[in-house]
Image (cartoon, rainbow, N blue to C red):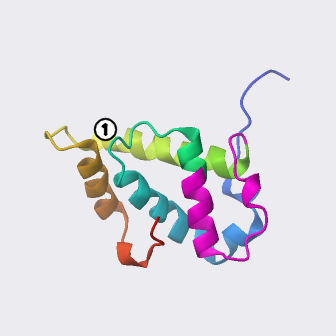
Amino acid sequence: MGGGRTRYINGDLPSALQEDRKWTKVILPALLVWAGSLGDPWVIPDQDLVRALRTIISAVDPQYGDLNGIRPGEPIFVLVNQFLFLVWLNFALTFPWTGNTASQCVAKQLRFHCSCTCSSFPRL
């Protein structure tokens, strides 16, 4: 009973995002495409991440219920932050710095990890 952080798992996501593995097959890869397009993908303000998540989710599932429920502290936001942290950590541990910009490095990692074509992702 401490003041520790709340831990979420994918099972805590709304069922609409879990069906057909939308979360892992579409939403997270689309989020990486978006993050890789940023000038500095290493530092993403919360409001920008919320806006991107709402845009991606509404494009993937136009009938999605409460977009206002996507905000800091909620399972979707916490899980995305955990995911991005693991991507950045993986990047730092596996790709030597080669003089590329951060967005070029993220794009390289995205191509490495994502087997689907980026043209199938919603444009932001």
- Left or right: 104 with respect to 8? left
x and y percentages locating residue 23 in the rendered image = 60, 65
Check disc 1 and report the residue beneath it. Answer: 93
Residues 114 and 60: in front is 60
- Assign the N terminus to one quadrant of the image: top right
Q: Residue 99: name its quadrant.
A: top left
x and y percentages locating residue 48 in the rendered image = 53, 46
Above/below status of 27 relative to 104: below
Q: Amino acid at mark 1?
A: Leu
Residues 111 and 51: in front is 51
- Left or right: 102 with respect to 99? right
Above/below status of 54 relative to 2: below
Q: Badge 1, how many Cα within 10 Å: few under 14, some, many 20+?
A: few
Magenta stretch contains residue 103 = no
- Left or right: 41 with respect to 20? left
Above/below status of 29 relative to 62: above
**Range of magenta residues:** 51-73
Question: Who's the residue at 68% across and 68% down the image?
Answer: 17
Above/below status of 15 relative to 73: below
Q: Farthest left residue?
A: 99
x and y percentages locating residue 74 in the rendered image = 73, 46
- Mark count: 1
Q: Residue 123: name its quadrant.
A: bottom left
Q: Is residue 38 visible?
A: yes
